[in-house]
Structures are given as C-alpha cells and as structure tokens.
C-alpha cells in the first residue's frame, strides 16, 4: 500500500500535482488504447462489442483524476464509436449493429458519469485528509496487530519518523510506548467503548522521551469487527515541564512564606478593588482628595480587606496562638485613623504596583507595634485575591530611636537653658553695672546737696556722670537687641504640606504615646508661603507639641488638627487645634510673654519665640479657646507673589 | 623712756577696686560726700602697686575683677599679711560666694545696686575694725620693743615671775639672791612699762611663745 494514498504531505492546493506525471502516462496509454480499439473496430470485421473496450480507456483516464480528461475521454470514445459504426454500416438502420453501438455509447457515458462521481468523492476525502494533515496533532492509524498503516505530518514532527519509515512498523515498538497504567486496561477500554484517552510516555526517534496526551478511537468494519485504531496525540512535554516548574515555584514560595523570619501576609483585595472600580466609574479622578473628604471609605476599605493567610512569624508578631486567629478583616490590626492605608489605596488606584511605608499595628494583646510594610499589587492583574504583604517589626528600634531623640531633645533643651542662663547672666551684669553706678551716683549727689553746706559742683559732676551712665546702660540694651536680630534668615518659598508631614513624622512617636489622632487638612491649591522654613517648622512643631501635651491628661477624644486656609489679604492662615484642656484664664493674657508657663518643666520661652518668629515673618500668632473644649492656635503668613506658586 | 611711739595717726583711706570706671567714680563721690578719703583702682594689680600701702582704712572690692577674682584676691592679700578689712560688692551675688567671702574674713557682701547707707555703714564698720586692729598691733609691737630691751637674765626672771613663782623660788632656780631677783624684777617692770604683775602677765601672754 503506497504511503501517500491518503495523507499526502503536499500542501492542499497542489494536492493533485504529484499525480501529473502519472496522469500523463495514463492519458497517453488511454489515447493509444482508444486508437487501437478504433482501428480494430473500424477496419476489422470483428463482429461484437469491441467498442466496450473503450470503457477501459475511460477508466484509465479517470485514474488521472482530471475532470476535463474524463469528459474528453467520454466524448472522444463516443465519437470514435459512432465513427466506426458509420464507417461500417452507413446510415443507421435498426439492426443488431446499431444496438451494439447504442449499448457501447451508453456504457461509455455511464462509466464516465460514475468516474466523475468517484472522482468527486475522492477529492472530498483527500481534502479532509489534508485537513487532518494540517493539524499539529500527531495522527496515525494502526491495525489490530499494532502495525502502523497511516502516519501524518504531525506524527512525523512529534516522533521524528517519516511516514515512509513508520508505516508497516509496530507502533509500540517504534515509539517505545510506556503506559501510565497497564496496556491491557487501555485495550480493554478501547475495545469495549471504542475510545481511550490518557497519557503515554513515548520515545522520539533521537531517543528523547516525549510525554503524549493520546486519544484513541476504534474503527470497525460493517460487520462490527475491530479493524483500525486511530491514535491522535499532543506533545505535552513542555506543558508538563512548565506545570512542574510552576509547582516547584509555588512550593518554594510556600517554603519561603512559611519559614521566613519576616512576617508575611496574604490579603484579599477583591472587595476593595470592586469599591475602587465603582469610584472610577463614578468619575473620581483625584482619589487623594476623595479619601481626605471621605475618611469612612478608608475605614470601610480596611474592613473589606481580608487576611487570607499569614506565616508563623506573623502569628508570633501578633501574639496569636494559631494562624486561624488572624484570618479575616484587616481592620482588626490597623487602627481606624491609619493614614498609611489610604496611601495603599492610592497606590492601588494609580496602579503603581508597590507601596511601602511605616505604620502601626495593634496585636491581639492590644499592644501597638511600629512596623515597616511593603505590599506588591499584581500589576495589571484581574485578580487581587492573593496580594502579598511583608511586614518588619521595628518597635524596639523605634523605641530606642525615640529614647535617643528624647535624650537629644533634653540635651538640646539643657544646652539652650544653659546658653540662655549664660547669656542672661552676661546681659544682667552688663546692664547691672551701669545701673549700680547710676544708683550710687544719684545717692552721692543727693548727699552732696543735703550737706550743711551743699556742694553743687560735686552734685552736678555726679549727676552728669549719672546721665552718662544711664545712656551707657541703654546702649547695652540696644546692643543686645541688635545681637538677637542679627541672625541671618533664609527666605524661601516652601510647601507647607510637606512641612506639616515632616512635623507629623517627627511627632509620630509622641502622638502614639499620648494616643492622639492627627488630621492634616490643608487646602491643596493654597499658595505657598515664603519664609525661613526651619524657623517656621520650629513654630509648627512647638504648637503641635504643646497641643499634644495639652491633651495628655484628657480622658476622652484626643484629636490634633493641622489646618491651612487662604486667609484675608493674600495671607495664609494656619491653625493648630487640639481637644485638650484649653488655655487657663489666669495665663491667657500673658500666654505669649517670656517665662510664662503652665508646665512644670517648661521654661516659658516657646510661645514667646513662636510669636516673635511669626511676627518677624510679617504674620500674627494668637490663640483662642474652642467652645467644645481645647484650644486653637492661629497664625498667618503673608503670601506675596501668588503666580509663581507651584512652579 | 625707750618706748617707741605708735605710727603717726593717719586719716583712714577707703580703697575702691572695681574695673568699672563709673562705679569707681560714683563710689568716690559717695565717700567724699561724707568726708572720707578715697583711692580708686581699676584692678588688683593697681591696688597692690599703690604708694601709701600702710595707710589705714578699708578695701571695697568687686567680686568680678579682670584677671583675678575678688575672692582669690582676698586670699592673696591674706597670705601677704595684709589685714585691711574688705567689703565685697557683686553684680550678681550668690549665697555660696558670699559665704566663702565672709568665712575668709570679709566684713560685708553687698549686691549691686546697693543702698548708699548700707555701703557707708559697712565701710564705717570696716574702718573702725581696722583702727582697732591697728591699735592692737601697735600695742603688741610696743610690748615687743620693750621685751627686746630686756637683758637675757631679766627675760629669765620675767618668764618665771609671770609663771607665778615667788622671788625666793626664782632666786633658787637661777642661783641668785632674792635681792638680785627683786632688782631684775624692778627693771623688767620698768622696761615693760607696767605697774602691776597682772599687766606683765598680760604682756607676756601677748608675746606668746616669744617670751
């Protein structure tokens, strides 16, 4: 059986092409035969249906598969039959010769029609076969003795054997087929149900093992006897390898996740992403502004974020017994007013993948932990059900840092006090010296005048010196003042929002210690103030620090609000508001004077310095008590040139 | 009489040491207004280099002086056997400093600006104290001079007599006759300028170990 009967390896369009040479020979043979038959029929006196031999001609030509050739052969043979008849018998008469001629013609035409139909069917089969050949799947057919009878291009590609080499060989030998199960089981299923599917381990011609997903179908003859088995196969070696690599990767991820000393969390952001998608649909573009206006959204989002898995380090970190204790909504561990979660939401919204920062967690014992976290959103993913978050506990480090900072602050304070003491002593001496002279001089002059014989000359000399010394004292005072204002100042335009964030970070620990919640409410479009950033930061820090301490003993809500608004006359109004004890009446009037303090350890210089700083910037600083309790400190800063803001 | 005359009685001088000229001038005016003599100095060195170093009076001293502190200067003077009473002034007197000064013999410690009367009272007291101590010193010096004029035998007699021995016992001790002891004793009484044994004993005590 020729290998190319069905599964020709030629492209579909040229399917008939290879037969051209053969069809030339067939046509020539047919023509010769036709001529021979014609000669015999015409020029011999053989009585009989010689013309019937023309059928052979038609069949020969039909083998070329060409429709035109078949039609030509039918027409040619018919004409030749007629010509022979007319030549031998003249004008037709109803006799036996005519009958033979008609029968011959009918036979030729019927053969032609049958040939055409056979040709059509053949073409269809060839077309279908070529389609099979086109698939990348390997398809081969074997008989019940496992001998390969058909072998397509896919099989050639999969196993490396050409059809010529494969056909006639035993399939299981050629392919060294190994089964995941038993061969008998496969055969049993195949012969009972007519089909089988499964994986086979087979060998490529070069010895390489290929993993094949095979589908077998049993073809039966009309009597129902098993005749042929068609086996289609797909190479799944690469897919399997990829699957295995994926599984290995997943296993390693698991191992790292479980054994890492860092705390890892898997969180499900699906519900949060849905909420954010809704916001997007509603046309929210500036999520930061939206979140600032809707703090409840942040809290909701936090409660919609589900912890789906944590590792052992996390269980330890949060003081839990079992991992199951920690699964569920995230907001259990994140305090409600957490600003960093809003940051995470912004990251998600902007699709920028990763967010990291510092935040507080509350563990199951109710202790606050300082942590660094990093979160990686799957970039452009459609699923957010397994977002990995890593957390590092820096509570101890923070505590040490804070202790260090507190110590530094104390040292700085002590140094300031010492320096101030030194300076005041110097100033006091500088001023006291002429004052002492003045007093003594005045008293001496009085004594000269009060003598029994007053000595006016002495008295006048004394008073002149007295005046001179008083001038000197005044000069000393002026010198001190000019010394104090000589400090060179940096005058720059700065972002108040960034300054406020810096202050918030610096006071983070203190706020946490006093359980104070901070709200920063700054007009985004407010113009940038101009001034000495360091000095003004000191002012804000000082006011915030005062506010935090003012709330230290308040039992209820402890809220610190930092607000900025466009003030009157092109100025910027900044307010620091607390829910503390408010300003006591007895010091309200002298609040900004130096050496006035309501705190044990205070020097009473802070607000005095704040006020002089603000005033030296051309602003004003004042304080009010809030009717609902607590105090508000307001200060203004002039904003001279508005147009160059936010360059 | 061989007894030396005490030094000529001089008017007391108030010495003011302060680095601030205005203070010096004011104090000078103040002291002169009550008839006191004043000498003012801008520094401790100027004071030590003054001409009339033996003059009586007192020292008005600022605690804070250029170069050396008033308290250190006080110690320095004391080491030099200068007994001039000191009234301290300070721009910013504190308790430890004033305690230290008073322990070291300062007469008063006034914080600037002081009341004129306080300063005058302190200075007046200082001058009196100086005068008294000078009198004591003069007296002692007279006794020493007298004692120096005694012969060795007379000193021996004086030592035993002031120790409470009878003439007879002294004579026995020194191997002299009672009469001779009496003559020596009369010479001692005369040379020491005393009339009674009690006075002689007092002088002997003032002389202390020298006797």
Image: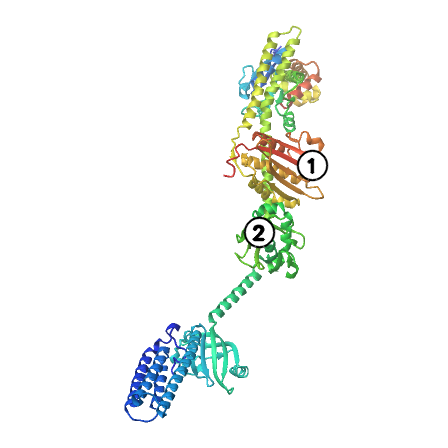
Badge 2 marks a residue whose secondary structure is helix
Q: Which residue is mark 2?
A: A280
The CA span between labels 2 and 1 is: 39 Å
Indicate left or right for A46 with A438 as reference: left
What quarter of the picture does the C terminus of chain B occupy? top right
- How many numbered circles does the render carry? 2
Q: Which residue is mark 1?
A: A626
Q: Chain of mark 2?
A: A
Q: Is residue A110 above or below residue A271?
A: below
Question: Do marks 2 and 1 both belong to one polypeptide chain?
Answer: yes
Which of the two labelled residues, at mark 2 and mark 1, occupies the earlier sequence position? 2
The answer to whether one can see residue A55 in this image is yes
Q: Is residue A616 above or below residue A549?
A: above
Location of residue A314 (image quadrant): bottom right
Q: Residue at x 62, y 7 (%)?
A: A455
Q: Position of residue A47 (x, y in %)?
A: 32, 94
């Amino acid at each position: 059986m020729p290998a190319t009967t069905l599964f020709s390896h030629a492209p579909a369009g040229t399917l008939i092409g290879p037969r051209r040479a053969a069809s030339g020979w067939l046509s020539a043979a047919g023509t010769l035969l036709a001529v021979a038959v014609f000669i015999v029929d015409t020029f011999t006196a053989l009585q009989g249906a010689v013309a019937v031999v023309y059928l052979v001609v038609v069949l020969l030509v039909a083998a070329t598969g060409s429709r035109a050739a078949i039609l030509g052969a039918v027409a040619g043979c018919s004409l030749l039959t007629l010509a022979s008849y007319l030549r031998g018998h003249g004008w037709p008469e109803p006799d036996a010769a005519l009958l033979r001629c008609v029968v011959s013609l009918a036979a030729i035409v019927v053969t032609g029609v049958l040939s055409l139909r056979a040709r059509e069917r053949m073409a269809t089969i060839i077309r279908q076969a070529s389609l099979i050949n086109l698939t990348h799947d390997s398809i081969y057919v074997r008989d019940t003795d496992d001998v390969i009878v058909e072998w397509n291009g896919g099989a050639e590609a999969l196993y490396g054997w050409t059809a010529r080499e494969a056909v006639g060989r035993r399939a299981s030998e050629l392919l060294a087929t190994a089964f995941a199960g038993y061969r008998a089981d496969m055969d049993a299923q195949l012969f009972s149900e007519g089909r089988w599917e499964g994986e086979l381990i087979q060998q490529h011609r070069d010895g390489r093992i290929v993993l094949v997903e095979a589908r077998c179908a049993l073809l039966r003859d009309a009597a129902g006897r098993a005749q042929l088995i068609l086996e289609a196969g797909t190479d799944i070696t690469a897919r399997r390898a990829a699957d295995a690599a994926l599984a290995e990767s997943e296993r390693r991820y698991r191992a790292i996740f479980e054994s890492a000393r860092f705390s890892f969390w898997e969180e499900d952001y699906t519900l949060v992403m849905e909420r954010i998608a809704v916001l997007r649909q509603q046309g929210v573009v500036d999520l930061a502004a939206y979140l600032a206006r809707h703090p409840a959204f942040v809290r909701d989002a936090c409660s919609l974020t589900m912890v789906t898995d944590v590792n052992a380090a996390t269980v330890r970190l949060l003081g839990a017994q079992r991992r199951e204790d920690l699964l569920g909504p995230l907001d259990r561990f994140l305090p409600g007013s957490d600003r960093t979660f809003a940051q995470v939401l912004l990251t998600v919204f902007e699709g920028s993948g990763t967010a990291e920062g510092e935040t507080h967690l509350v563990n199951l014992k109710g202790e606050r932990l300082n942590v660094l976290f990093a979160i990686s959103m799957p970039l452009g993913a459609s699923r957010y059900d397994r977002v990995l978050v890593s957390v590092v506990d820096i509570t101890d480090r923070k505590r040490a840092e804070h202790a260090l900072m507190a110590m530094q602050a104390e040292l700085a304070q002590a140094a300031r006090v010492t320096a101030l003491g030194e300076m005041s002593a110097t100033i006091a001496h500088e001023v006291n010296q002429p004052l002492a002279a003045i007093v003594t001089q005045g008293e001496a002059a009085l004594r000269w005048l009060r003598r029994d014989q007053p000595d006016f000359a002495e008295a006048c000399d004394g008073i002149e010196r007295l005046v001179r010394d008083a001038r000197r004292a005044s000069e000393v005072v002026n010198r001190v003042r000019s010394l104090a204002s000589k400090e060179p100042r940096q005058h720059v335009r700065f972002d108040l929002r960034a300054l406020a964030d810096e202050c918030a970070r610096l006071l983070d620990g203190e706020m946490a210690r006093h359980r104070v919640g901070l709200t920063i409410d700054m007009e985004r479009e407010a113009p940038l103030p101009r001034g000495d950033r360091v000095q003004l930061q000191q002012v804000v820090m000082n006011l915030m620090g005062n506010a935090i301490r003012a709330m230290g003993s308040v039992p209820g809500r402890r809220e610190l609000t930092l607000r900025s608004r466009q003030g009157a006359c092109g100025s910027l109004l900044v307010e620091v508001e607390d829910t503390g004890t408010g300003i006591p009446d007895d010091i309200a009037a002298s609040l900004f004077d130096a050496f006035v303090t309501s705190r044990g350890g205070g020097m009473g210089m802070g607000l005095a310095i704040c006020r002089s700083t603000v005033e030296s910037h051309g602003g004003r600083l004042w304080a009010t008590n809030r009717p609902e309790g607590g105090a508000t400190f307001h200060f203004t800063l002039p904003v001279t040139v508005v147009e160059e803001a936010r360059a | 009489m061989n007894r030396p005359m005490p030094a000529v009685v001089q008017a007391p001088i108030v010495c003011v040491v302060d680095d601030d000229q205005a203070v010096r001038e004011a104090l000078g005016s103040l002291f002169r207004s009550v008839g006191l003599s004043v000498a003012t100095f801008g520094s401790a060195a100027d004071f030590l280099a003054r001409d009339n170093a033996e003059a009586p009076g007192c020292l008005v001293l600022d605690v804070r002086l250029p170069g050396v502190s008033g308290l250190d200067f006080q110690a320095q003077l004391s080491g030099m056997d200068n007994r001039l009473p000191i009234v301290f002034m300070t721009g910013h007197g504190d308790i430890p400093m004033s305690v230290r000064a008073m322990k070291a013999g300062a007469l008063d410690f006034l914080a600037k600006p002081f009341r004129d009367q306080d300063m005058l009272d302190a200075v007046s007291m200082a001058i009196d104290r100086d005068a008294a101590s000078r009198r004591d010193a003069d007296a002692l010096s007279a006794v020493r001079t007298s004692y120096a004029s005694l012969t060795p035998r007379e000193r021996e007699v004086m030592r035993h007599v002031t120790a409470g021995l009878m003439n007879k016992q002294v004579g026995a001790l020194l191997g002299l006759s009672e009469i001779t002891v009496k003559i020596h004793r009369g010479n001692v009484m005369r040379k020491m300028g005393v009339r009674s044994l009690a006075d002689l004993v007092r002088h002997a005590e003032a002389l202390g170990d020298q006797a």
